[in-house]
Image (cartoon, rainbow, N blue to C red):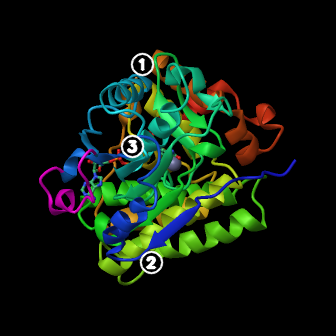
């Protein structure tokens, strides 16, 4: 069976595109109880962008601190219950922020129309009804959350996405000016998530002409942003990075991630390490799996004076390493892709433990 996926319905791209958000929303303001909800990264509170939000009387604006924890099921349920009780059913929800805010907007959109706790819907195609109209406005680029069909939530039992066709945004507003203020280290780690998506997508059995075409172009853009002459945080490169993130995400949709993401999930789950940073920590030591990708990654680190910590594994007990390896081992789709359908003949829990010990 070939994958049959839904994409974003509408995309506007260009510097200053954020100014069009008001007109875009006006078309949908008559729906449901006729108000919009804006979920905005706390970083923008008091910044010029906050005063440019096209808010009308009756709209709800929430600033969310994404540094406290990654999006949780409890957080989404509480937000949904509060908005429904105080204001009714929104016409739409707009997320303005990074991957965390994208996931919050996508998940909340679905939970406004699906009863009960979001923990009931963590997994593939468990959502029963389409959500409300939802719009993504990314302010940091790299995770591809703006284009993916999942909204990753941490629940009491599992960290797993609400994944279905209705998760995908109805509208995305890509304004490269919005990512200009991203701190340099996050700019690097989050952008590298895209680069790693492409390297992994390309190197495995699910790669195909469709995923390859997106990965190739996305990697070219990443190299301009992080490696070639003229690299760095410039307005031109911000445009390139925003499109690289989108295309990296599309490449993945039609292929798979691999060894680096498998390890990174272990780090995030057991130690709480953030997704993009965890990927960088792991990828740095995967030269034997991705020789070219890791060699270029090291050049990029050097070019932008980014130092990754070494010797982390010395601080980890065997129990911690085993737990992380178990999380990784239980991602068979990633190992299938990266190693082949006979991966279990080649990769054991001990192999993965040894990989973690490299860190
Ligand atoms: P993030 O949203 O967690 O934000 C990282 C930091 O950057 C925060 O401190 C934030 O306040 C700050 N920030 C955001 N925009 C800024 C700006 N313009 N200027 C200054 N600071 C800014 O970052 P992320 O790495 O994009 O997202 C990580 C999250 O994405 C994780 O929760 C992960 O689970 C999720 N994720 C989702 C998918 C998906 O397909 N749904 C894929 C990968 C990761
Ligand atoms: Zn990733």
Q: Do tag 3 and tag 1 residues touch (Cβ < 8 Å)?
A: no
- Which circle's residue, 1 or 2, is located before the other in the chain? 2
Using the image, determine if residue 53 lies above or below residue 268.
below
- Which circle's residue, 3 or 2, is located before the other in the chain? 3
Which residue is drawn at the image coordinates 44% and 75% (left, top)?
240
Start-end of magenta stretch:
45-58
Q: Which residue is mark 1?
A: 317
Do we see residue 278 in this rendering?
Answer: no
Q: Main secondary structure of the magenta part?
A: loop
Residue 304, percent from left and from top? 31, 67
Q: Which residue is mark 3?
A: 100
Using the image, determine if residue 156 lies above or below residue 151.
above
Which residue is drawn at the image coordinates 38% and 24% (left, top)?
81
- Distance in Å between CA atoms under marks 3 and 1: 30 Å
Q: Secondary structure under badge 2?
A: helix
Q: Which residue is mark 2?
A: 224
Q: Secondary structure under badge 1?
A: loop
Position of the C terminus, as image quadrant, is top left
């Amino acid at each position: 069976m070939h994958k049959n996926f839904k994409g974003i319905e509408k995309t506007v791209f260009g510097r200053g595109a954020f100014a069009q958000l008001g007109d875009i929303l006006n078309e949908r303001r008559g729906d449901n109880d006729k108000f919009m909800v804006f979920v905005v990264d706390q970083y923008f509170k008091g910044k010029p962008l906050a005063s440019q939000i096209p808010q009308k009387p009756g709209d709800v604006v929430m600033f969310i601190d994404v540094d406290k924890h990654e999006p949780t099921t409890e957080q989404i349920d509480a937000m949904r219950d509060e908005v429904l009780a105080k204001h009714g059913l929104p016409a739409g929800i707009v997320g303005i922020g990074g991957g965390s805010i994208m996931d919050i907007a996508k998940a909340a959109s679905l939970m406004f129309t699906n009863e009960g706790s979001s923990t009931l819907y963590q997994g593939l195609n468990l959502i029963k009804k389409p959500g409300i109209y939802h719009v993504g406005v990314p302010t940091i680029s790299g995770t591809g959350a703006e284009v993916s069909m999942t909204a990753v939530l941490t629940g009491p039992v599992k960290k797993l996405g609400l994944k279905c066709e209705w998760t995908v945004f109805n509208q995305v507003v890509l304004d490269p000016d919005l990512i200009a203020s991203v701190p340099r280290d996050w700019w690097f780690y989050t952008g590298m998530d895209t680069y790693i998506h492409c390297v992994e997508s390309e190197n495995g059995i699910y790669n195909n002409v469709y995923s390859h075409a997106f990965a190739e172009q996305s990697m070219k853009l990443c190299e301009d942003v992080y490696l070639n002459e003229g690299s760095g945080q410039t307005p031109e490169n911000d445009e390139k990075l925003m499109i690289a993130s989108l295309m990296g995400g599309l490449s993945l949709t039609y292929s798979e991630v691999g060894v680096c993401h498998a390890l990174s999930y272990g780090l995030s789950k057991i130690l709480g390490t953030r997704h993009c940073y965890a990927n960088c920590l792991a990828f740095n030591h995967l030269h034997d799996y991705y020789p070219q990708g890791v060699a270029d990654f090291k050049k990029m680190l050097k070019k932008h004076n980014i130092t990754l910590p070494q010797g982390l594994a010395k601080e980890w007990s065997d129990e911690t390493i085993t737990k992380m390896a178990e999380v990784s081992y239980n991602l068979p789709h990633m190992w299938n892709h990266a190693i082949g359908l006979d991966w279990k003949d080649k990769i054991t829990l001990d192999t993965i433990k040894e990989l973690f010990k490299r860190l």
